Image (spheres, rainbow, N blue to C red):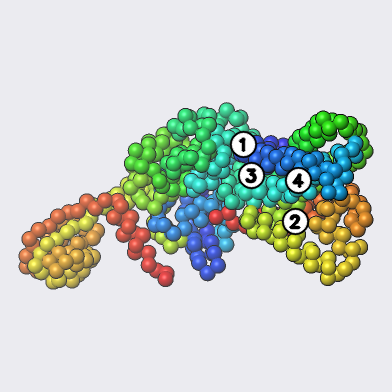
Amino acid sequence: MPVITIEGLTKRFGAVVAVDGLSFEVDKGTVTGFLGPNGAGKTTTLRMLLGLVAPTAGTARIDGRPYRELAEPVRHVGAALEASSFHPGRTARNHLRVIATAAGLPLSRADEVLTQVGLAEAASRRVGGFSLGMRQRLGLATALLGDPAVLVLDEPANGLDPEGIHWLRGFLRHLADQGRTVLVSSHGLAEVAQTVDQVVIIAKGRLVTQSTLADLTARTDRLVRVRTPQAAALQPLLADQGIHAELTAADRLTAVDTTAEAVGRAAAGAGVVIHEMTTEHSNLEEVFLELTANQGGRS
Amino acid sequence: MTRLVRAELAKLRTTRLVYGVAAAMAAFAILTVVANVTAAGDQGNPPLSADSLVPLVGGPVTLLAGAALLLGILGMAGEFRHQTITQTFLATPNRGWVVAAKLVVLPLAGVAVTLTTLAVTTAVAVGWLTAKGVTPSLLDANLGRVLAGALLAAAMFALLGVGVGALFRNQVAALVGTLVWVVVVEGLVVSLLNAPSLTKWLPSAAAAAITNPGGAHLSQWGGVLVAAVYGLVLALVGTRFVVRRDIT
């Protein structure tokens, strides 16, 4: 049963179409990576989902209702957007207390969530002196304030050092283990690959693919790199077999979405000499880059 | 709404803005008292007497109104400046309620700053006058009128500030817009029309009537009412057309 439903969501800023007829769903209890290159429309989509930006067309709903119509939004949905939306002169604890007050939550929640994100010692410090990583943690603490079942996190890995990213992975996993539904955006797959069950990939405001991480991983083992003096001749032979291959050098080509056996058979049949052949376990990041780069439909 | 009012109060308590403005106002007010007392009796200035208290206390009233206006503008537009408006609207998606809470709380802040400043000024002025052998009366009816006018003005100017802040969203634009209106536009309209019976209804003139009623101005309560209407209309228009825009 979907918790988040995006249907035909479109946003135009003047002549720029930031989000273009986007539809996808996020199921209850899953961690979904919302991925795309910078400028793909992720933040605009999330802001429409949270009622901060009005869609030009389409709807974004949480448990069947637009965010603005949720009775107690902070208890229902926790959101962490960009890391700069704090008053620099306010302490971390007071930042949280202000929101807790507006949401009718006990003020003690402020210290509880600060402890959860490892910021308890910085509670009395002004946010103006915080590092980007600390701001990200404070953003996560803000999202957790109402103990919500749904979390919407925009690029929480931005500005984190490797240790911070490691911490974030564990933290997201922990949230998922508690049965929360998490939608987490990222411009790279690596930060979230170990955490997400589902991926929604967008580019230029459009959906590229929605699949499980497992399905996406299955697409990675199918790159075959071939070194042959007859690379230019092998390419059309492979194409006849329905195998797409690209010349990467005069004597090298890379066959996509196939197996070494299939390439070997095609080469042997035509008497093409092969000097070297490797099955590439291309990493997820490459698949991601390929998927988003090929989205050149609209100029 | 109670929650929102409390949240707005918490916002003001947890940054240095209000304390800073209050401290600056108190310091300025004390300086005015010092300057006026030391200048008394010189170069045609009237010597100190029991009647000196009211002008001493009333000296910084106009500036206090300006400070209240500033608090209103910064309280509203400052949330956009620091992007805290994102969290505010996430917690309270109904933006009209947020503006309404600010219309309640920022006038209170303006009154609090004014009250503090006037209390400090009065204490210093009374103390000094007494030391100089003059016995001022705190029961002076004029003193009561000045204090009441100052408090009402602070509330109304803060209300106007929230309205302006909602209309511009950008705090620099709101400040510049206010200055341009007060210094250029309204002055121009006044001199072009040359009709005090009409121009006394303009915002600055109406607001000025609160501390300086009668004559060419409206009555004190007339000024309060007209300023309140301007503030609320600005806030309403701002909420309807500006505050509801996308938060990106």
In which quarter of the view is residue B248 placed? Answer: bottom right
Q: Are marks 1 and 3 in contact (CB under 8 Å)?
A: no
| Residue appearing at x 57%, y 59% in the figure | A55
Q: CA distance from mark 2 to mark 4?
A: 21 Å
Q: Is residue A24 left or right of residue B179?
A: left
Q: Please give the name of the residue rendered at 12% of the width and 62% of the height, measured from the top-left corner.
A: A227
How would you rate the neighbour count of disc 1 (Cα within 10 Å): few for under 14, some for 14-19, many for 20 or more?
some
The residue wearing badge 1 is B14
Which residue in the protein does label 4 denote?
B64
- Residue found at the far front of this picture: B43
**Which numbered mark, 2 or 4, is in the foreground of this view?**
4
Q: Chain of mark 2?
A: B
**What is the CA distance from the residue labelled 4 to the residue labelled 3?**
31 Å
Q: Could you tell which of marks 4 and 3 lies nearer the N-terminus?
A: 4
Three-letter code for the amino acid on which mark 2 is drawn: Leu
Q: Residues within 10 Å of mark 2 (few under 14, many from 20)?
A: many
* x, y percent for residue A265: 12, 61
Please determine whether, in this image, residue A93 is positioned above or below residue A255. above
Asked if disc 4 and disc 3 are in contact, CB closer than 8 Å, the reply is no
Which of these two is toward me, A226 or A121? A121
| Residue drawn at (53%, 61%) of the image | A10
Residue neighbourhood size for the residue with mark 3, other residues' Cα within 10 Å, grouped as few (<14), some (14–19), many (≥20): many
Q: Is residue A26 visible?
A: no
Of callouts 1 and 2, the N-terminal one: 1
Give the residue pinned by disc 3.
Answer: B92
The three-letter code of the residue at mark 1 reads: Thr
